[in-house]
Each structure stands twice: as structure tokens, then as C-alpha cells.
Amino acid sequence: MQEVTNVQRLSKRVAGLKPSGIRKFFDIAATMKDVISLGIGEPDFTTPKPILDAGIRSLQNGETHYTSNWGKMELRQAIADNLQKLYGVKYDPATEVVATVGVSEALYLTFTAILDPGDEVIIPTPCFVSYQAEVILAGGVPVEVPARLENQFMIDPADIRKAITPRTKCIFIGYPSNPTGAVATREVMLEIAKIAEERDLLVVSDEIYDRLVYDFDHVCFPSLGESLKQRTVLLGGFSKDYAMTGWRIGYACGPADIIQGLVRIHQYTIMSAPTTAQDAALEALKSGNSYVEEMVAEYNRRRKLLVAGLNRLGLSTFEPRGAFYTFPNIKASGMDDETFAESLLKEEGVAVVPGNAFGPGGDGFVRACYATEYSKIEEALHRMERFMSRHG
């Protein structure tokens, strides 16, 4: 039998990817009892009943076959109608909207479609862990530009300008932000828009948390003007707003030529988004608004509890304006963020994620998620108080 050699079996691109800094702590937590997780970025709510029922009806009616590669026209029309109603931005559902397997697939499709080897993508950090990886997998080069606490983790457009090179193809933005909860103001978005137009750059805007904002208005980037819409790919979905993470349904909207490119890849890799999930998503757009508002109100209640509690413990926390994350500074503990997260988990059974998992600018912070029930957050704060009494 021929021996296996030491030849590199994985591509350099894949072998060089860093493991997710989020999963490490959940793997540890899974071996422990009585852990309260403030880590996982997933709604603790069950998908609202009318949406569940629509999925069940879809199966009972025999909707178990492929749809168009683009997704069902009824769903694409509803997505377009919803974006026009909320933000005044118009998309042609026939050529400018595609249904995807969550925003994760939309992200993959977008970077694969627009990037040639060596093209650079400017990515404000701290950010969700997939962004840089998807750029690398598409053959591009992520250029990380840290946002700062003094700007409430909104990226400074001047820093974007400094990062542009002749290889820059795209600016990526993701507000409301995972992990910081930051929401960009219209003024900041307009400055980014100006840069994109001046330098003839594409923009990819991940707006998966668009409805989860508190005392703040979400700015839909392509709504800033028709010329911006023609250079922007808008990514959105149902996982966060409608508590539909397991359904794996999202979408991408953008100029027809770019969306056609996404569909070309999508048809060879996926075929079509799950039919049952498409039918459930359609119902979410028809009847889910009141449920979204109820969930936002509850998230807001939890947000206030967690922010106040963390600040009281000396874990300085700026007030997040969107999503369902806080990003406390853990300097008062005397630990780095990796040590803090590991020690808190092992000593008190509370799981948070080190800020360095989210890229430059995250060092010295941790992500604590309030998508868990109020009483568990109260107990987590009680445990963290014990922890800080020993280490703070």
C-alpha cells in the first residue's frame, strides 16, 4: 500500500483560515453543566406561529420540489415591496433580487462574483468572523480598518480613505454591527457613499439586523441615492429579525448584472434556497411585523439590564444602538480578553466571546449577547459580580 506523503492536501487558502474564535468557547461550554451563554448570536425566541404554520402548510401541500434558481417570484416581490416600504429603495424582483441560504450564502456568492485574485476589500472591524474568511475564500484580500470606542465603534470614513489602494475593489459595511451593537449615522454613511463614488468602488452592505434598532433609525445604504444603489449589493435575511436562524433563508439585492453573477454561482452550488423556508419567509413579510416589534421591545428591556449591570461592575460598556450585543471593556479585570472569557466560563459558568475573535479593535473587549431570557441575564450578572469581586 502506498504511503500517504506530507504533500499539502488542503489548499493554502483553506489551510490558512483561522478557526472561529467564537466556537472555541462553545466547545468548552458544551462539556460543562449550568452554563449561562451570553455568547451565541441567536434569538432565543421560537419562530412566530403564523410563520411556523406557513412552513408546515408548505410541506403538507407538497411544496417539496426545487424552485427557480432565483427563488419564488412571490417571495422576491415581497422582499422588494418590503424594502421600498421601509426605506424607499426600489428593486426589480425579476432581475435584482435572489433568495439565498441565509445571508451566509449571499456573502459567499457576492465576494465570489465580484472579486478577482488579489482584489482588496476594506472591512471595518471589529466585525462578524465570516467577513474576512469569505473574502479570502473568494481569492481576495481583506483590509481590516479598526473602528474605535471613542466613535462608538462607527468607522471613521477618513480611515477608509487611508486604506484605499489601487487594488481596492470594494468597501464592506455591516450596521447594525455584530459584535459591537454600533449603528452608523446617516452622516457617516453619506461620507462612505462619497468615497465609493469618488473612487469608483463597489459597496457590500450586510443589513441582517436592520429591524433590531433602539431609539435610532437604521440607514439602508442603497437608499442614499440611485447612483449608490447601482454600486451596492444589499444583503438581508430573516434569521435575526424574525427568529428564523434554522430556516436558513436570506437574500441579496443589487444591480442586475451583479445579481446575475450571484445566480450563476448559486445555480451550480446550491440550486435554490429551501422551498419550505421560502414559503415561511413570505409569511414573515406578510404578517410578522407585530412579532418583530414585540421581540425588539423585549430585546430593549434586556439591553438596558445588561448595559447597566456591566457598567455597575466596572466593565465599561457603551450603549449599543442595534442588534443584540454589548461590547464591554474588560480592562478593570486586569486580564486580556481571552483570559477573561476563559476564566469567567470556568469559574462562574458564564460564556462570553473574546473581542479579539472579531478582528483589530476588539482586543480588551468581550462580546456579551442579550438574546437570552431576562432572568438568565440577571443570574449571569450576579455570577459576574462574584467574578469581578475576586479579579476586579
Image (tube, rainbow, N blue to C red):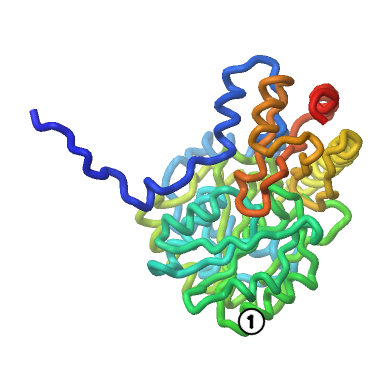
Q: Position of residue 377 (x, y in %)?
A: 81, 29
Q: Amino acid at mark 1?
A: Ser
Q: Position of residue 223 (x, y in %)?
A: 71, 72
Residue under the point 70% across and 53% down: 177
Evaluate whether residue 112 shows in this view. yes
Is the residue marked by circle 1 packed among few (<14), some (14-19), or many (20+) residues within 10 Å? few
Q: Is residue 237 above or below residue 345?
A: below
In the picture, the quarter occupied by the N terminus is top left
Q: Residue furthest front?
A: 334
Q: Count all numbered tags in the image, as a single digit.
A: 1
Q: Position of residue 312 (x, y in %)?
A: 91, 36
Q: Between 246 and 134, which is closer to the camera in this rendering?
A: 134
Q: Is residue 173 left or right of residue 121?
A: right
Residue under the point 62% across and 63% down: 145
Q: Is residue 38 left or right of residue 357?
A: right
Q: Between 238 and 139, which is closer to the camera in this rendering?
A: 139
Image quarter of residue 335: top right
Residue under the point 51% across and 48% down: 101
Q: Position of residue 120 (x, y in %)?
A: 49, 68
Residue under the point 81% across and 50% down: 320
Q: Secondary structure at mark 1?
A: helix
Image quarter of residue 387: top right
Q: Which residue is tagged 1?
A: 227
